[in-house]
Image (cartoon, rainbow, N blue to C red):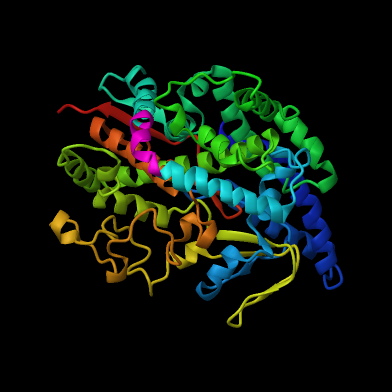
Amino acid sequence: MDLSLGLLSVAFGILLASAATVEVYYLVSDYTKNLKSAASYFRIWQQKVAVIINDFLGSGQRSARYYIPWSRPNPVLIGPDQIQELSDASQLSQRAVYADIFGFKYTLKNDDVDLDPAEQAAHRYRLYSRAIRVTGLAQIDALQPFLQSSCEKTLRTTIDDSLPSADGWTSVRIAPMMRDLASGMLSVYFFGEELSAEPEFSSNLLRFYQDVIACMGALQVVPAFLSGFIYRVITKKGKALSFLFKRLNQTISKEKDGWHEKESLKPLTLLHNMIEASKEYPYWTADRLIQAMVGIWFAASHQPWINLHFVLLELCDRPEYVELIRKEIESQEKLDYATISRLPVLDSFIKESVRLNPLDLMSIRRKALKPYTFSHGGPHVEPGQIACYPAYEVMHNGARYTNPDVFDGLRFVKNPEAVSKTIKSSGSAEMRGTTLTEGSKDFPIWGFGSKICPGRWHGALVLKLAIIQMVSDYDFRVEDTKARRHFLWETFQMPYESTRLLFRKRVR
């Protein structure tokens, strides 16, 4: 099922029906006392519904907007002075807010795995830090060839093995291709090549991701008492998640030899490292470990492919950067992790693409578990309220980013004049030399503080390997320059599944 179509087919019908009912209710409540005639009331109702439909259809626009059309409490926006508190305060929960958005009560079996919030958070961050940030980062250079092999295989299957047109171009839907590219590499890192190659396992990994995205839309527009029923309908009673729990239980069980992987790769996988890091902690039962793995998988597989989608579209719009990146790649003697992480043009272009096309217009979302007042005259939040950082506004702040609405692929290059005499960069001096994986108040894509994404180096490597391979081996362009590229679900940007690129093998 396509992501955008799946999300909309599940949520759209529910949403429109709910919108009509709820809009009528609120409009009656707000206006009937003051309206002089039924005709006036109908005209106001018609105008509001017309705005909603126009946004949903995206009439005259390159993107559509989907949202809950009735009133809901706005999140409390936090400024740069309180960003550290927003990230790290124990009274504010990251997991709780995303549990509401993605329905983790159902989609991650939260009710089936006993989790005390405070205790779980401490154990979780300790485990993630050891398995991903410490061990995983130390092994990333050895892991790279396996990720690159996965990337090459996906491109070969998707492009080279497809039948090109008479002029040599192959038409490919970009969203599924980017999803396959990113999830293929990440699956090798998470589970190894053997487990990832199992057709039933790989198909259920993808199905689980699609289930969660579909539930994200549907569970926002139905009454709470119907959530369980809607979840069971969408996911066929959690079929994909149940399979993943069963298969991963076989893998980590001491009584069963359920995981056969080459010895050169197995110690590099996240599954292996999480098993090893959790052995000395009784807290980490098999079910808790699997739930953590599946949760990380969803988070890790969601952002990279969407970022990759937008980066590639930006490259299509700016062929001069394609040539610049090619020259940078071809000038290297080897492309190991250390080299790739230091390619300034590639890093800057990706970072600028992400800045202008963030997955979420907000970042560092937190749900208050207890009353909390921010320091330095900051706002107060009550239990249940959502606080977040306005990422889009921050990354379009003219005081921090010169010409913030203009794409500048060399904005973060330390010495742009040294890499290009033709492409001019007007980036501010304080941004020069900052990299994609750095988290800051000005670039909060990865989060901030102690809870900043521990796997951002792996995510960045996945993006860079994919771009390097495509830029090196293929010419590419957008098939229809007027085609829609993304839509908004609330504050989340999602690619359209129908957008196509044309690929052709480069002749060198």
Asked if 248 appears above or below 365 in the picture, the reply is: above
Q: Compared with residue 369, is residue 229 higher up or lower down, i.e. above or below?
A: above
**In the picture, residue 204 is in which quadrant?**
top right
Question: How many discs appear?
Answer: 0
Residue 431 location in percent, x, y? 32, 66
Task: Pick out the residue farthest to the bottom.
Answer: 377
Where the N terminus falls, by quadrant?
Answer: top right
Q: Quadrant of residue 411?
A: bottom left
What residue is rendered at 41% in x and 56% in y? Answer: 356
Residue at the image position 66 percent from the left and 64 percent from the top = 90
**Membership of 144 in magenta stretch:** yes
Identify which residue, 493 or 123, lies in the foreground: 123
Q: Quadrant of the C terminus?
A: top left
> Is residue 457 among the parts visible in the rendering?
yes
| 466 vs 24: above or below | above
Whether residue 399 sits left or right of residue 109 in the image: it is left
Nearer to the camera, 28 or 478? 478
Quadrant assignment, res 139: top left
Magenta range? 138-147
- Depth check, front residue: 506 or 435: 435
* SS majority, magenta: helix
Residue drawn at the location 57% of the way across and 46% of the way down: 127
Q: Residue 281, image x and y in percent?
A: 64, 43
Say if residue 482 shows up in the picture. no
Check residue 34 for magenta coloring. Answer: no
Residue 202 percent location from the top left of the image: 54, 24
Residue 393, above or below 241: below
Residue at 38 percent across and 37 percent down: it is 480
On screen, residue 168 versus residue 58, left or right, reads left
Q: Residue 100 vs residue 63: left or right? A: right
Percent coordinates x, y for residue 189 in the rendering: 46, 33
